[in-house]
Image (tube, grey):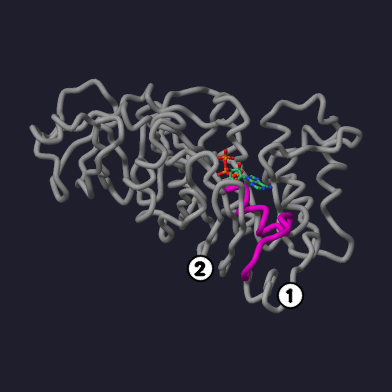
Amino acid sequence: MSLELDIRLPLARFTLEVGTRLDGASVAVMGRSGSGKTSLLEVLAGLRRGARGRVVLDGRVLLDSVARSDVPPEQRRMGYVPQDALLFPHLTAEQNVRFGARPGRVSRVDEAVEILELAPLLRRYPATLSGGEKQRVALARALATDPALLLLDEPLAALDVALKERVLPYLLRVRDEARVPMLYVTHQLGEARVLAREALLLDQGQVRAAGPAAEVLGAAVRGLLAGEGEGEENILEGVLERPDDGGLRLRMQGGLSLCVPDSPALAPGTRAAYAVPAADILLSIQPLTGVSARNVMAGTVVNVEPVATGEDAATVEVAGVRWVVWLTSASVRELGVVPGARVSLAVKTSACRRLR
Ligand SMILES: Nc1ncnc2c1ncn2[C@@H]1O[C@H](COP(=O)(O)OP(=O)(O)OP(=O)(O)O)[C@@H](O)[C@H]1O
C-alpha cells in the first residue's frame, strides 16, 4: 500500500493537518480522545466535506482540491468500519456481509466468512448477536467490498474487555490472510505493536510522529495517552503445541515458546494470541534459577523509557520477540537496567491470558 496524505480540515477547536506518506500494510492511528483520528478516517473515506489537499492511494488520486477532484465515497474502495458500525437489522448476518459485495467485483464474501469464522452465525439477525459477533459481521461486510484499504475506527473500544478479547485475533487474520491493508485506530499500545507495521500519532490535529511502529510506539505515545486506556500489555501470537513433557505451549516466530494455561479444548496446531500485562513480568539481572514460574527467558535490554505513572518501561529482546516490562524507576537504577544489559525475565503461566 502507498498512501500519500496532505490534508487540511478545519474542526471545531483546531485544524486537522496531516502531511505524511504511509507504505506499511497496517498502520496504527493513535492519539488522545478528540485528537482527530475519526475525522482523518472520514476524510479518507470521502465522508467529510470541506477537506482540502490531496489523498493518493496506490497512485489513484482520491482528493485533489486544487484540481477540484473529489472521488465519491462509493468509488474510493475504502472499507470503512466506524466506531458504532451498524448492521441492517432486517437482514441476516449473511445478507449483511453480501450487501457489500458488488456484482462485477472480486467477491471476498467466502473469504470474509472463513476468516471471521461467521459460518455458524450466517442465518442469525443482528439483534441476536453479541457485540463481538456484530463487529465481526461489520468487518466481514467491509472486507467483502474488496477494499483497497480498510479503515477501522477503534473496532474494539465500544466493547467491554471480555468481548474485546475476541476480535483482535480476527484482525490479525484479516491482515495475514486477506492481506488487505488497514488503517487502524486504537488506544492500546500492545495491540498497535502486534498489529501495525507503521504508526501515526495525532495530537490536536497535528502529526506528532509517523513512521515504523517500532520507532513510534514508545515514550511519545505513552506520554500522550497517559491516563487513558488500561495498562500496557504484551501481545504474543503463535501456534499452540503440546510437547511430550506435558502442558500447552505457544510457539512464536523465531522459535521462542511460552508455557500457557492448559485446556483440553485447545488443539495443537491452532493459531492463538495471548496477552501478558507489562506489569506482571519479573526482571532480574542475575540468571534466574529455582523459581516456580514456568517461563524463564534470557534476553537483552533494548531501551528503557519512562512511563507517565512514575515507572519505567524496559524493552527486552528474547529470541527476536520484544517484551515490554514495567518496573519502578528505583529498580531500574538499583539493578542497572540499561540498553545492552543481559537480563532474565520470568512470566507465570497464569499471567498469559488467551485472546478469544
Ligand atoms: N463534523 C465536525 N465539525 C467540526 N468539528 C468536529 C466535527 N467532528 C468532530 N469535530 C471535533 O474535532 C475534534 C476531533 O474529533 P475526532 O472525532 O476526529 O477525534 P478522535 O481522535 O477520533 O476522538 P475519539 O478517540 O474520542 O474517538 C474534536 O474536538 C471534535 O469535537
Whether tag 2 and tag 1 are in contact, CB under 8 A, the answer is no
Q: Is residue 10 or residue 4 the one in the foreground?
A: 10
- Residue 221 highlighted magenta (yes or no): no
Mark 1 packing: few (<14 Cα in 10 Å), some, or many (20+)? Answer: few
Q: Secondary structure at mark 2?
A: strand
Residue 2 visible in the snapshot: no
Q: Which quadrant would the C terminus be assigned to in this image?
A: top right
Q: Which residues are magenta?
A: 37-54
Q: Position of residue 101 (x, y in %)?
A: 83, 55
Q: Image height check: is 263 above or below 235?
A: above
* Residue 85: image tag: none
Q: Is residue 238 or residue 81 the one in the foreground?
A: 81
Mark 2 packing: few (<14 Cα in 10 Å), some, or many (20+)? Answer: some
The residue drawn where x is 27% and y is 47% is 317
Q: Image height check: is 26 above or below 52?
A: above
Image position of 165 (left or right of 197): right
Q: Image height check: is 108 above or below 114?
A: below
Q: Secondary structure at mark 1?
A: loop
Three-letter residue code for mark 1: Arg
Q: Position of residue 142 (x, y in %)?
A: 74, 50
Residue 177 visible in the snapshot: yes
Single out the residue that lies furthest toward the front. 13
Q: Is residue 109 or residue 129 the one in the foreground?
A: 129
Q: Which quadrant would the N terminus be assigned to in this image?
A: bottom right
Q: CA distance from mark 2 to mark 1?
A: 21 Å
What residue is disc 1 on? 68
What residue is disc 2 on? 21
The residue drawn where x is 24% and y is 31% is 311
